[in-house]
Amino acid sequence: MTEATETLEDRLSRIHLALESERLDHVDGVIADLEPAEIALLLESLPPAARLRLWERVPGEIDGEVLLHVRDEVRSTLIEDMDHAEIVAAATGLDTTDLAELFEDLPQQVAEDMLRSMDEQQRTRLQEALAFEADSAGRLMRTDAIAVRADVSLEAVRRFLRLKEEVPDNTHALMVVDRDGLFVGTLPLARVVSHDPEVAVAELMATDVDSIPVTMSARDMATLFQTHDLVSAPVIDEAGRLLGRVVIDDIVDVIREDSEQALMNMAGLDEEEDLFAPVLPSAKRRAVWLGINLATAFLAAWVIGRFEDALDKIVALAVLMPIVASMGGIAGSQTLTLAIRGLALGQISRINSAWLLRKEVGIAALNGLLWALVVAVLAVLWFGSLGIGVIIAAALVINMLAAGVAGIVIPLLLKRSGIDPALSGSVILTTVTDVVGFMSFLGLATVFLL
Amino acid sequence: MTEATETLEDRLSRIHLALESERLDHVDGVIADLEPAEIALLLESLPPAARLRLWERVPGEIDGEVLLHVRDEVRSTLIEDMDHAEIVAAATGLDTTDLAELFEDLPQQVAEDMLRSMDEQQRTRLQEALAFEADSAGRLMRTDAIAVRADVSLEAVRRFLRLKEEVPDNTHALMVVDRDGLFVGTLPLARVVSHDPEVAVAELMATDVDSIPVTMSARDMATLFQTHDLVSAPVIDEAGRLLGRVVIDDIVDVIREDSEQALMNMAGLDEEEDLFAPVLPSAKRRAVWLGINLATAFLAAWVIGRFEDALDKIVALAVLMPIVASMGGIAGSQTLTLAIRGLALGQISRINSAWLLRKEVGIAALNGLLWALVVAVLAVLWFGSLGIGVIIAAALVINMLAAGVAGIVIPLLLKRSGIDPALSGSVILTTVTDVVGFMSFLGLATVFLL
């Protein structure tokens, strides 16, 4: 019985101290108590040199499991550090589903050798798994489902299970199939143990079960598991034949990655990004994002440049113009974030987007008026010019309304074009609020104050 | 056997059409096929009026379940629409854990009446559940765990289970306790069905099981379930007595809410925010965030104001200054997002933060130099002044370095002060990059160009 109360941070300190002081027995001691997923978190938390020293201490028999749990980018750094034989050894312990996940990250030579070293059945299974699209049910399913026939008794089922070498601990239901292998229902073990042995499977099985088409996407499966409170579900082919089962622990990983993705994409980052990636490749990847933003910043600068005359004459305009742009950006990003979450959950469609737009514009109008008043008073007090106060108030209201509209319209348009709204939404939004902000403020000033 | 292929969007269209055309039988038809969690998603996706019309069609016997699945804010709008008797009816169908979750959202009068109408045992159970801190294991645990003694045989266990009226389908392991009710291990049903009846529980049970202290936080449980691939876990009190079990579907909700929170908080929103919240209260809540940002925008404006002289003489400075601030903001938010994710996963601590800082500063330096060069060339071409090119390049490098440092230091300081870095990190960061950006660019210009 273990009580898991030590935090990752505590472990990190212990491992770090042990590595620093070369007390490798201590390192081994910490590792011995941990699950592969926990070792994966520890490896991700260490800078490259320490990471590789820890990796060398991870016992070979769990190398494969650990590799499955680290982010893609970290995985390649670990694989680079292994020799051919180590990689083969790590991979051979895995079941087909896990091996398929790892397979495409392996060096080509290793992958080829591994295929050659497999027996016919293993190779066929792996190739079948690889034939399914990444992130589909076919890739994620486990093939360890135990199937029984509907016309047998519970007694026969129990005899069958006793004859099997092992029933996985995480089996909570048996799959029921007909004589052609077509899926007909599930038989929760809770029912097997709580009913008389002479009852037939057909009488007890659950038939209103959610079965998953083999082509279903990971994201759709995640929604299904969440809304139906599933722990496992059968995977079937087009004909309805049972192919395997998807279990909740693999779905939990999908849910976590999916939600991390939105957060990271909004900053132009990849969710597979290694916290301790080397400087040069990281800088390269981020440079793209910065370049795109630079282009939009120059666009905003060009807009400002159109009003050099006004800026030259009234220096207060230069001082105040970032306020108009910034408030629009903040208001817009609130609307955008709400829309991105709604789109990710499938809660926004043509049906309700008009209503949502009206609501967000309403909020923008109220907050625009409120803060326009505040800004106007402060501007008048600061620069002693009523004109500037009126103009910044008008510009602020215009920009916040534009932000409200853009915060809904941009992600909807991106989604319709098949582009991830979380990734490009904020760049485009900021461009809109900068351009509208500078243009309305400086434009109004040019018309009314010069 | 049902294949869940209809998307939420399809359902939304169908429900919307049916509500518009007053075809209430169609509405009922759609609802009848759905799980409470799916109805909850649909309700959240409808504007207030349509939402309430749909809510009236939801059968009373699943009202409670649906209320559990909607966001807090939506929940209160639905409860407001129910009369006293409906609320009581909805709540009575729920088990203690679910009722405790709902209880604090009920109108006080309803809550009091409900307590009075309960029998002694129900009331005690509910009060016990409510005594645990929100989001602790005590609140999340179910009390339907089935406990057996270690010294009995499997045969005795089966007899016991057959005598029970019902074993919940989602039971996948029995809890094993000693004569004092102390938890000693679990017995997966997979083992019960695959072993001979005369074997004793003690021989088969798993003892290296993660047990959860009743005070453990939801977040820590989520980490434990994810890293240990758990489906359920026993909850014990300080003495080691078995109190209940936590099951994966409740943990999946925690994981989803937790990750949504980071996304929403970064925009100053609450993850419980209703997509279709009424305009006035929404505007009020967002106003706070906008006000904070306005204060920082004025700070930036004040900095610009210190350099009126330079702006007055060289108008190009006003045109180009937003570029310096914007590039710093973007670079900083990349670093900040990476740090926020790392902190949320517990992967950043004092041990590795120095290394991380060095890495991010390295990236900032490389990208700073690269984009400084590009910006300098463009600025020289635009304004024909070598001085402006050199100065904007220098300011850009300074600001991007500051952004790299701030992107790591700010979230670490916030975390240490017990403030959520996702919530306030980006405001503070933008303040730093705006102030440093304007100050370095305009300051250098004042010193070298005037």
Image (cartoon, coloured by chain):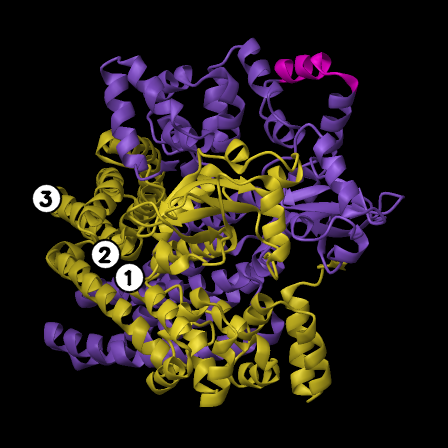
Chain colours: A yellow, B purple
Residue that mark 1 sits on: B308
Going by the numbered disc 1, the residue's amino acid type is Glu
| Chain under numbered label 1 | B
Share a chain, discs 3 and 2?
A: yes
Residue situated in front as seen by the camera: B269 or B118: B118
Residue A303 lies in quadrant: bottom left
Question: How many neighbours does mark 1 have within 10 angstroms: few (below 14), some (14-19), or many (20 or more)?
Answer: some
Q: Secondary structure at mark 3?
A: helix
Q: Is residue B49 visible?
A: no
x and y, in percent, of residue B291 in the image: 42, 42
Tell me the distance, in whole angstroms, between the alpha carbons under discs 2 and 1.
Answer: 7 Å
Q: Secondary structure at mark 1?
A: helix
- Look at the magenta stretch and give its main secondary structure: helix
Residue type at mark 3 is Val
Residue under disc 3 on the same chain as residue under disc 1: no
| Magenta span includes B114 | yes
Q: Viewer-nearest of labels 3 and 2?
A: 3
Which residues fall within the magenta stretch? B108-120
Q: Which mark is residue A315?
A: 2
Is there CB contact under 8 Å for labels 2 and 1? yes
Pointer 3 residue: A447
* Quarter of the image where the C terminus of chain B is located: bottom left
Q: CA distance from mark 3 to mark 2?
A: 16 Å
Quadrant housing the N terminus of chain B: top left
Q: Which residue is drawn at the image coordinates 62% and 50% (left, top)?
A: A159
Q: Quadrant of residue B133?
A: top right
